[in-house]
Amino acid sequence: MTTVTTAPPATRTGGEAPAPAPRRRRGSWLTPLVIHTLLIAGAAAMIYPLLWMIASSFREPHEVFTESGLIPSGFRFENYVDGWTGLTYDFSRFYLNSFLISTLAVIGNLTACSMAAYGFARIRFRFRGFWFAIMLLTLMLPIHVLILPQYVIFQRIGWVDTFLPLTVPHFLAIDAFFIFLMVQFIRGIPTELDDAARIDGCGHIQIYLRIILPLMKPALITTAIFTFIWSWDNFFAQVIFINSPRNFTVPLALRSFLDQQADSAWPLLFAMATLALVPIFTIFLVLQRYLTTGIATTGLKG
Amino acid sequence: MVTETRPPGPVDRAEERARAARMRRARRRERRPVFLFMGPWFFGLFALTAGPILASLYFSFTDYNLLGSPSWSGLDNYAGLLDDVHYRNSLRVTFIYVVVSVPLATAAALLVAVMLSGNRRGIGVYRSTYYLPSLLGGSVAIAVLWRQIFGAEGLVNQVLAATGLDRVIALVFDVEPGTSWIGNPKYALNTLIILNIWQFGAPMVIFLAGIKQIPQDLLESAAVDGAGRVQRFFRVTMPLLSPLIFFNLVLGMISAFKAFTPAFVVSGGRGGPADSTLFYTLHLYATAFRFRDMGAASAMAWIMLVIIAVFTAGMFLTARYWVYYGDQVKLR
């Protein structure tokens, strides 16, 4: 009898229509609320230091040590002006340096890595599999086993304390990771397109320029974004290869600012630190979609 | 018929030879761009990767101070490292940093990803907010911020004092109220561990993508069978995500082993106080460029390569016991 079998759940849920299964337990509406509360609390705790840094960059020096809140008592924009000129050279110089290095690195990676990737994916040459395996091996090498001899080489040819060691290697497709990324992408492009172009008289160069490059735009965008971010934040190489303040990048300038200033200069330092995050934050805002899909599909770390 | 089975005459031979030559030329034309396309990479491989790696192996057996030329010293550098108390400290510090921060960051990433996956509402905002620190965290700016936050009069101590928790915390952690966490050898490393955990957003995004791939009917049938939230997580979600957990652990450990910027900035390049933040890479940098001992630094780099390789191999060995790949068991 149906009444007998549906009676127990009916009484428990307060006379509603017979529930399909006793899946929704008492108080289950609470859990979304609890989860949202936890998530908001966690997000607030994680973002708070950043917001506090921005707030402190507008404060009086002594307030940095007393004000843990976010609402400033007044806006001291002078902190930004004074911080900008706080070192021997203006920060405009450091930003130009950083932008130059990062932009060149992006151009280098886009051209050299895509060419090598095309070679691996579409040209049959002797020992291709072997070289591909070598390329994958270099992917796993920590930079530390290479950078000391590289330093010796660059020193011999007089490149130390110039931007060349930070840019030229990208034109030699040193970032195997992006080659691999692009090879995987090119392999997904149907070879029928190449064949059609070949029948129309295109050689490899034409196929690369007119077929493959336009079709691999997503991979190129991912490469550009991550090359820019990594090169902007590549403090380890910058601290090794660049010595004179004239050539400082933004991270190097910040670090020397930190070392030179007494505690009184925290707001100035925070002002410059906040500005130093702006380029990457802008990329994050504008290209977020590419960033997260890039990470999700390739496992790139931000 | 004669006309149909024409024996190969001189004309056909020439034609055949011409065709073969054309083919050969075409093939060569096809192959010629190899140098164009692969040239930069080949040059980079030999000049910036293969050459240097052999050179650093050689340097590691020599006495080399960048000024003179390297002179062979056998295993002296490696033996010297064993006696170097700073080197042993750097190994210990880095090991603690890797072993504590990476599993915690991965666990946080997994937890938040699972919490996010159930709620479609606002997921974009949450994801961006949690992801942002991992994008900014490696920068000098954040390291500068960290140095203030965990300083004597930093944000953490301000908040503790304001909430009246400072006495409790001081008692629990056995420090004076208002101590500088960064200046305390016992806790300086913990501030950097917190910094690394703070950046769990990148693995979280990977987990979110993985969770999306989990067939909904698996979770539903588990629910029909009476599995609760927790059980569904441990019995369905976790096993299906285990390849990604493995992936994130391996990647996280390799990158944590190579961490440099936070320790360098927070400790002013010295790894102090009392070597408590002397990361491996920091000591390597100091050995090479402050003490100008390229030989010892190269030996450190090679030991690092071996440690990372062994660590990764070890992870892969354990993988077969806890990483679940779909093809092992037939699901349906």
Image (spheres, coloured by chain):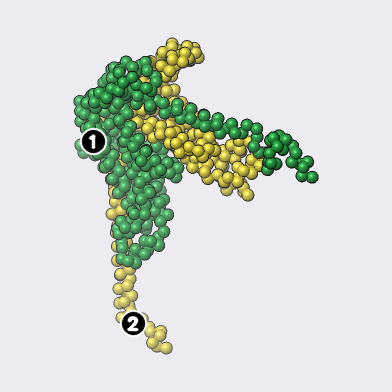
Chain colours: A green, B yellow
Which quadrant of the rendered structure holds the N terminus of chain B? Answer: bottom left
Label 2, secondary structure: give it. Answer: loop
Dot 2 alpha-carbon crowd within 10 angstroms: few under 14, some 14 to 19, many 20 or more: few
Which residue is denoted by mark 1 in the rendering?
A: A96
**Subunit ID for the residue under disc 1:** A
> Which of the 4 image quadrants contains residue B140?
top left
Q: Does residue A186 lie above or below A266 as drawn?
A: below
Asked whether, in this view, residue A66 is left or right of residue B290, the answer is right
x and y percentages locating residue B249 in the rendered image = 48, 35
Label 1 and label 2: CA atoms lie apart by 73 Å
The residue lying toward the viewer, choosing from B126 and B295, is B126
Q: Which residue is drawn at 49% across and 34% down?
A: B109
* Kind of residue indicated by mark 2: Gly
Q: Does residue B181 lie above or below B305 as drawn?
A: above
Asked whether, in this view, residue A172 is left or right of residue B308, the answer is left
**Subunit ID for the residue under disc 2:** B
> Which of the 4 image quadrants contains residue B4?
bottom left
Residue B9 marker: 2
Q: Which residue is drawn at 69% across and 35% down?
A: A14
Q: Which residue is drawn at 30% across and 18% down?
A: A60
> Which of the 4 image quadrants contains residue B157?
top left
Q: Is residue B81 visible to the viewer in this orientation of the structure?
A: no
Q: Residue at x 31, y 77 (%)?
A: B15
x and y percentages locating residue A136 in the rendered image = 40, 46
* Kind of residue indicated by mark 1: Leu
Q: Residue pushed farthest bottom? A: B1
Label 1, secondary structure: give it. Answer: helix
The residue lying toward the viewer, choosing from A258 and B242, is A258
x and y percentages locating residue B276 in the rendered image = 40, 21
